[in-house]
Amino acid sequence: MRVLVISSIDSDAIAKMSSEHDVKCHVNPDEATLSQLIQDREVLILRSGVFVNAGVMDSAPELKLIIRAGCGLDNIDVEHARRRCIKLHTIPQPAAFAVSEMTFALMLALARRVLEAHAAWSRGKWLKTQLKGRLLYGKTLGIIGAGNIGSRVGQLGNALGMRVLGCVEYPTPERAQEYLKKNIELTDLDQVVAEADFLTIHVPKKESTKYLVNADVLANMKKDSFLVNIARGGVVDEKALYHELTEGSRLLGAALDVHEQEGDGKISPFADMHNVILTPHIGSMTVDTYKDMGIRILRILNSFVAKQGESQVAQEALA
């Protein structure tokens, strides 16, 4: 197969793939470059960071398969891919472990004021008695989007002795019962927001989730609470969040792994705020996740090739 890889993936997977297929790699190309690179390709492999629109797909008349190494499809024109009968595969499982652990890394860093302590002590300031933090134990964890990643976050919250509330886009009584087995109480968005000491976000980016966490939602958050967005930039209205953190009285702090503007040269409006932690969309960026993703990419590709071969044999038998 003629394969194009446009995101950074495990080097062992690239080597194995290259021994069996015609593989080109070009990380994060712009649209014009991508349209050139993809022209003769049958398979496209990517993560986030590059948008594959209808024009890009139509530059590749032989494109048959897109593998999105992750859980989101917001950077792919899904409807056009379906119209073209291009197979779409996501790989959500490995990221769930990495993103859920990163969520707690950010929550703990916020609660215990780790970055403030590091910055002060790096300047020789020993602020032992001034930097009182907060416990996670005994607090309420609110999860907006208690799906694959969010439910894993809830289980980790249980392990730390937190009460866990969650909401999903399509709740049912049956689903609520399943979540209760994980000690996650499924309820509505309003209750999750109002009762959470730590509010975490794990929803896909789409029209219905744009600015889902807006000024009204922030105004309904519990006093002295924390917000963690590790979903997608644009789910949180950053202007409203900035106003709440500078002028409001609800939030003690926030952590943002995803941002409305991402990439080299962009400066976050929260950059100088002592109670905000900023990371560059690294929720799933672990060595272990990369290796697992690479293994699964190879399985998907090999399975697709095998099915293509079976289909070809069947067509020849009918001819």
Image: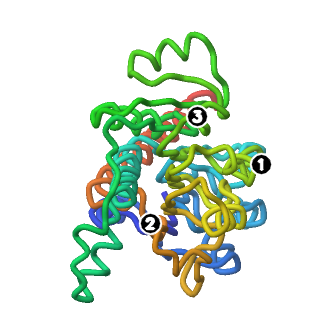
Mark 1 or mark 3, whichever is nearer to me = 3
216 lies above or below 178: below
Residue 255 x %, y %: 48, 61
Q: Amino acid at mark 1?
A: Glu
Q: Which residue is mark 3?
A: 192
Residue 223 x %, y %: 56, 47
Q: Amino acid at mark 3?
A: Val
Q: Amino acid at mark 2?
A: Asp
Badge 3: how crowded within 10 Å, few (<14), some, or many (20+)?
Answer: many
- Please give the label number shown on residue 22: 2
N-terminal-most mark, 2 or 3:
2
Q: Secondary structure at mark 3?
A: helix
| Nearer-the-camera pick, 241 or 278 | 241
Q: CA distance from mark 2 to mark 3?
A: 49 Å
Badge 1: how crowded within 10 Å, few (<14), some, or many (20+)?
Answer: few
116 lies above or below 83: below
Q: Secondary structure at mark 1?
A: helix
Q: CA distance from mark 2 to mark 1?
A: 37 Å
Mark 1 touching mark 3, by CB under 8 A?
no
Q: CA distance from mark 1 to mark 3?
A: 21 Å
- Left or right of residue 256: residue 12: left
Mark 2 or mark 3, whichever is nearer to me = 3
Mark 2 or mark 1, whichever is nearer to me = 1
| Nearer-the-camera pick, 100 or 119 | 119
Residue 217 x %, y %: 70, 46
Q: Which residue is mark 1?
A: 207
| Nearer-the-camera pick, 21 or 254 | 254
In the rendered image, is residue 229 in sight? yes
N-terminal-most mark, 2 or 1:
2
28 lies above or below 78: below
Mark 2 touching mark 1, by CB under 8 A?
no
